[in-house]
Structures are given as C-alpha cells and as structure tokens.
Amino acid sequence: MKKIDPVSRRVVLRGIGAALCLPMLETFGPSTALAASKTVASPRRMIFLSYGWGVARNDWFPEAAGADYKITKCLEPLARHRNDFSVLSNLSNKRASDGHWGCTTWLTSADVNATPGKQFHNTVSVDQLAARKLGIETRFESLELAASKEDSKGAGPGLSLSWSEAGNPIAGETSPVGLFDRLFGAAQVPLEQRKYQLRHNHSVLDAVLSDAKSMNARLSKADREKVEQYFQSVRDIETRLNKAEDWLDKPKPKAPFDRPKGNLTTSEEVKLMYDLMVAAIQTDQCRVFTYRQPGEGLIRELGYKVDGHKTTHCTTDSEAYEAAIARDRQRAEQLAYLIDRLKALKDPDGTSMFHNTLIAYGSGIRTGHKLRDTPTLIAGHGGGGMNQGRHYVYESNQTPLANLWLGMLNQVGVDAKRFADSDGKLGGLFG
C-alpha cells in the first residue's frame, strides 16, 4: 500500500477512474508531535461581512468601555460568544463622503473623488491584498458574495464589497446555488474542451493587449490612463485564468450537503451562504471571503412595512426603529450561527477553525447617513494573540478604520506597513 505523506493537508483518493479530493484531515496533517510543537501552522482566514443603512444606534453600541460592558439589545444573540469578539467604537473612514454608501469604501478607505479628472475612482480593497498571500494554495484566491441589487439598497456603488487593484468593482455571487456549483458542481464540459477554452481565452487577452499597446503612443494622457486601467482589468482576468488553469485537473471535493433549492427566504439565503463559506473553509478551497448582505428582504420577512432607508433616519419610538432593532438582532443571530459552525470544526493542529479566522462585521454608515464612528465588530482570533471580549473605545472620530484593516492583515501574516489612510495599529486589540 502506498504510504501517504504525513504532512500533506490535501489527500486525493483514486480508484476505478475516479478521484475525490478530501478536506483537510488531522490524520493526514501534521503529526501529533508536530501539532503540539506548533511547527506546522494552520491556515489563516478572513471573512468580511457588511450591509447598508447602518444600525439601530441606541441599541447596538455599548455604553461602557472595557470587558465589563453591558451587551446591547441588538448584540444579545451573540452573548454566548462574548469572549470571542469585540465591539470597536470611534473608527471612521474619514474620507467617506456619501451617506447612502454603506459598503462602497468600507474595505478600501478610499477618497473616491481624489483622482483629478475622475468623478469616481475607488482603490483596492483589503480582502484582495490578503488574498494575494492567503489564496496562493487554494482553488479560489477569494470568494465574493452579494445580495441581489434590489436587496442591497444603501450599499452604494459596487458589485460586492471587493475592489480590484485598479479600483474596479469585483462581481459578487448572488445565488447560493451558483456558489454551490462553483465549489462542488460537476463539470459539464469535458476536460480537453475546458483546456481549449482557457487557452483560447489567453490568446484573446494576448491579442487585445498587443493591439492596445500598439496604439498607446497615439493617445492623449487621459486616454492612456483609461487604457492603463483597462490593462489592469485584463491582467486581473488573466490572473484568474491562470488560477483556473492551475486547478483544472484537480477534482473538486465532495459536497457536504445536497445542492440547494430555489425560493429561499432571505434569512435562509444568508444561513446557506454561511454554510457554503464553512464548507469552502472545511475543504480548504478558499481562505478569504466577502459578503455584502441583504437588508430589505430581512425587514419584510420580519413583518415590517418600512424600507431600509427609513431605518437610518427615524425616531426611536417609530416603527422604522423597531424594524432596525429586529433586523440587527436577526443579523446577530446569523453571525452567532456562523461562529458556532466554525467553532465546531478542527484544524489539523487541533485548534478550531474559528480560532484561526478573523471575521469583520459592520457598515460604512452609522445611522442617519452619519459616516463617523461606524458600527464595527471583530470576531475570531486569527491564530491567537488577540485580546478579545471587550468594547474598545478609540479617540473620538479620529481613528481610521484602516487601522483595523492593517492590524488584520498583519495578524494573518501579510507584511504590510500601511493601508489607505492608516496611521498605526489599534492599541489593545492586537496585543
């Protein structure tokens, strides 16, 4: 019998013409001695969850700072995980300027109006920087998920939370069925045909780049900038094609549950997206996720007749505010469910997958279209060394949200000195 490499985290079983890629298994991972000595580290992962229109301000933010804060009505469903998350107050994207954009610059901290001659120009999002390092060994460098356009009101421009190196929007998968098929679906096109399609796509890209570069000298400065942006978009596509080609011969893992059905309620959709994220982590297909979450559907499902826009500028004795509280509690329940799932799964070194994951949860809008001191919660431990279980209150409206993104990058092993307008790491949280 062929001996299996004991340090390999990927095991492929082969027989009678079939192949099955198993998820990471402790049996085939580092030995007990190695795990105990921590010489082989488990993967680090990042999940970013955001939504439009902010939160119910008086019932989301705690009053007292420190570890003994009283958990608020909106966050009560997370109480069982209190020691594993922290609420962060007074973090702001100080360059944000549009009170209807809850997600557009949440992960970029960009001044979208700062580029001369352009009405709108975003920059790369923090998840994409993380994916460069964390996604090297996985089938997908990152996975971008999003609610439908109708259910993403208040999110602002963009197709997901993610933006490319060139500041272009990255499309988000809006269907749990579509995500399931990407992760576990059987290929309907024969392997040789898929190889041909990839080669053909590469040849098309090469031709486009060659033709565009040949005319570059005849273009104005403004047009050259546009072409360069286009080049970057093509390079992004080429990178993804190269990734697809690398994984073309490798079988997808067996799905942990049946293919989803359609006609889901909004809460069922969110839960299923979380289940699929966990499945992708369990099979080590991806380590960086973003999810621009639904809002309008949750409010309707809870029986309220108001829209999300009203929940962000209303009095505390109104139906809209009551709807905001119910929506925020529902989201907290869903987040608690995701944490439960990750805590129940073990990495090869014996720690939980939650221990090796960081989850950022929040919005670029506080309430009433206010863009300072935005709701921010971080869960997980990123492999260890973090001081969780507290309400951190930073300098009023002066601490960049980008400091959190920089700290998260460093925590998962990305060597970055700055991100966007960051001016340091967050004291206390990252040790």
Image (tube, rainbow, N blue to C red):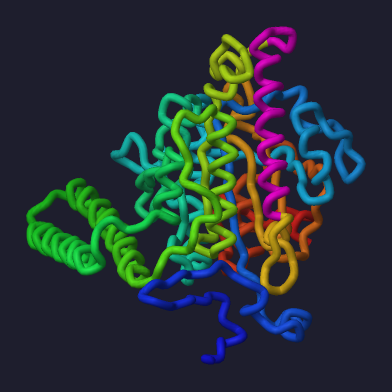
Residue 23 lies in what quarter of the image? bottom right
**Residue 30 place in picture, x, y as percent:** 66, 81
Q: Is residue 67 left or right of residue 259?
A: right
Q: Is residue 120 left or right of residue 42?
A: left
Residue 111 appears in the figure: no
> How many numbered dots are placed on residues in this image?
0
| Residue visible at 73% across and 79% down in the picture | 35
**Residue 357 place in picture, x, y as percent:** 66, 58
Q: Is residue 431 left or right of residue 382?
A: right
Magenta part of the chain: 315-342
Q: Quadrant of the C terminus?
A: bottom right
| Residue visible at 76% across and 86% down in the picture | 33
| Residue visible at 67% across and 68% down in the picture | 347
**Residue 374 place in picture, x, y as percent:** 65, 34
- Magenta region includes residue 108: no
Judging depth in this view, the residue of 207 and 219 nearest the camera is 207
Identify the main secondary structure in magenta: helix
Judging depth in this view, the residue of 163 and 76 nearest the camera is 76
Give above or below for 414 relative to 371: below
Give above or below for 307 relative to 237: above
**Residue 146 place in picture, x, y as percent:** 46, 39
Residue 272 appears in the figure: yes
Judging depth in this view, the residue of 332 and 418 nearest the camera is 332
